[in-house]
Image: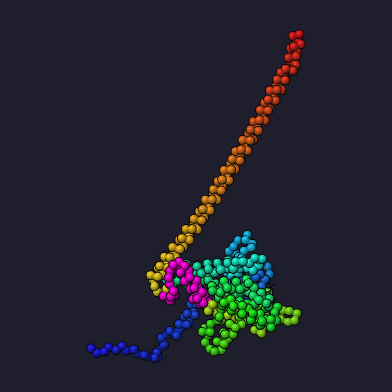
């Protein structure tokens, strides 16, 4: 039989087909969908967190004059006020628009972090927050209807860590926190209020910090050079990484500068501070990379660890979308784990309710006894008083009878 040949015909397209328009379609769709970014800010009180956020997004997201937070923004305080020696989680969301592009920004803060005498485990509420946001995403991914829906992405895309401008060393708490967080979150350490250090001090401090981070195996976000194309941009991207931890200055209320008797520091001037580099990484050039890395590396890492802990073996994340059997198994395990958790939670609540009820009953029982006893005592007292009165009355009656004038008259009369 004659050898059958598969013929592939290569032909230049000389008529316009239309897929050159794909980027435009994609662009339109993303604009419509909007962008979201969730930023965690951690650092001791007064290190200029709110000031920096306002300067970064050029909006009074935080009201620095009166209350802590601008009034037209959505605020939730997830913990109650009563816990005064615990790190809390505060969330503030706002929409920012620039040239028709909307950014839904959420800033997560941890008031109280580093502010107590004993800061042991003060990173725990923050780690819990990151994990619960991962869990929520995992849940939404595993919903039955997986068809084409866009999941709301509440995962934390970056963490700004504010280092106090001491010029000496990182504190134990700094290192501990960054060590706990860097595998869960894109870490960007910054030296805040760096205007109190001179250029030399900043240079030295940066080197010390970098050395300490290296010794403790703490990684921070590296803007990827593959995300840019020309050699100039590659060099700039490398420089962006080298300059971390950025030495930052935040603008005075409503301004983009800070005035001193000896002059003015312009926030946006790269000769004055590293603010523009931070803005480049966080917003202008690498926001999408931060989101991407959160999804493909940090979340994926969390996800596979979680599934492993549930006894699901899987390592090749590329295949997970295409293996319905594995997906079903995962769903089942996750569902079972959720049910088990719900059950134990319900049991605890039930037991709590029962013991509360019992205590209440015991209390009301003893109250009842007490009241009964009081009543009895009162009645006994009343009875006694009455008897006393009766006795007195009888006595006085008897007296009256024996001394009655009628009787004496009678006596006299008889006499
Ligand atoms: P908490 O909300 O209490 O945790 O403080 P915060 O970290 O949000 O600090 P905030 O932005 O409220 O700033 C505290 C004080 O530091 C304010 O008086 C700011 O004007 C001042 N400040 C902020 N940024 C800088 C800076 O870069 N340099 C200097 N010198 N002062 C700054
Ligand atoms: Mg603040």
| Closer-to-camera residue (138/305) | 305
In the rendered view of the protein, which quadrant contains the N terminus? bottom left
Q: Examine the structure image and report whether residue 299 is included in the region drawn in magenta.
A: yes
> In this orientation, does residue 29 appear?
yes
Nearer to me, 291 or 341: 341
Q: Residue at x 46, y 69 (%)?
A: 308
Residue plotted at (51% across, 56% down): 348
Q: Quadrant of residue 77?
A: bottom right
Q: Looking at the picture, how far across and down is residue 281, in whole percent?
A: 58, 80
Q: At 64% from the left edge and 75% from the top edge, which residue is drawn?
A: 170
**Residue 269 spot, x, y in % from top left:** 65, 83
Q: Position of residue 136 (x, y in %)?
A: 50, 67
Q: Is residue 32 magenta?
A: no
Q: Residue at x 52, y 50 (%)?
A: 354
Judge by depth and name the residue closer to the eye, 107 or 11: 107
Residue 280 sits in quarter: bottom right
């Amino acid at each position: 039989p004659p050898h059958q040949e598969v013929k592939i015909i290569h032909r230049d397209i000389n008529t316009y087909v239309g897929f050159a328009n794909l980027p435009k379609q994609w662009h339109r769709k993303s604009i419509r969908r909007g962008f979201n970014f969730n930023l965690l800010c951690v650092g001791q009180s007064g290190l200029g967190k709110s000031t920096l956020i306002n300067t970064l997004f050029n909006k009074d997201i935080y009201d620095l004059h009166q209350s802590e937070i601008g009034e037209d923004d959505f605020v939730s305080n997830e913990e109650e006020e009563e816990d005064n020696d615990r790190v809390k989680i505060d969330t503030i969301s706002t929409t920012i628009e620039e040239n028709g592009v909307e950014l839904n920004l959420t800033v997560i803060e941890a008031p109280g972090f580093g502010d107590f005498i004993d800061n042991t485990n003060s990173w725990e509420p923050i780690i819990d927050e990151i994990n619960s946001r991962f869990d929520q995403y995992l849940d939404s991914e595993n919903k039955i209807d997986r068809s084409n829906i866009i999941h709301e992405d509440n995962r934390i895309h970056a963490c700004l860590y504010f280092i106090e401008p001491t010029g000496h060393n990182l504190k134990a708490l700094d290192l501990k926190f960054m060590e706990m967080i860097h595998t869960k979150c894109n870490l960007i350490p910054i030296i805040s209020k760096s205007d109190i250090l001179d250029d030399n001090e900043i240079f030295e401090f940066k080197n010390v910090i970098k050395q300490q981070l290296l010794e403790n195996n703490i990684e921070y976000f590296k803007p990827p050079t593959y995300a840019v194309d020309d050699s100039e941009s590659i060099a700039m991207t490398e420089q962006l990484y080298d300059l971390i931890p950025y030495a930052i200055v935040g603008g005075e209320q409503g301004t983009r500068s800070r005035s001193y008797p000896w002059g003015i520091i312009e926030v946006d001037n790269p000769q004055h501070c590293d603010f523009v580099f931070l803005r480049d990484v966080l917003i202008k050039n690498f926001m999408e990379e931060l989101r991407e890395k959160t999804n493909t590396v940090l979340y994926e890492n969390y996800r596979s660890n979680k599934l492993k802990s549930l006894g699901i073996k899987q390592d090749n994340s590329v295949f997970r979308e295409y293996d319905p059997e594995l997906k079903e198994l995962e769903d089942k395990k996750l569902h079972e784990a959720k049910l088990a958790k719900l059950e134990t939670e319900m049991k605890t609540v039930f037991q709590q309710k029962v013991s509360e009820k019992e205590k209440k009953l015991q209390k009301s029982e003893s109250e009842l006894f007490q009241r009964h006893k009081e009543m009895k005592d009162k009645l006994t007292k009343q009875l006694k008083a009455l008897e006393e009165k009766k006795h007195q009355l009888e006595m006085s009656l008897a007296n009256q009878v024996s001394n009655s004038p009628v009787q004496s008259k009678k006596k006299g009369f008889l006499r």
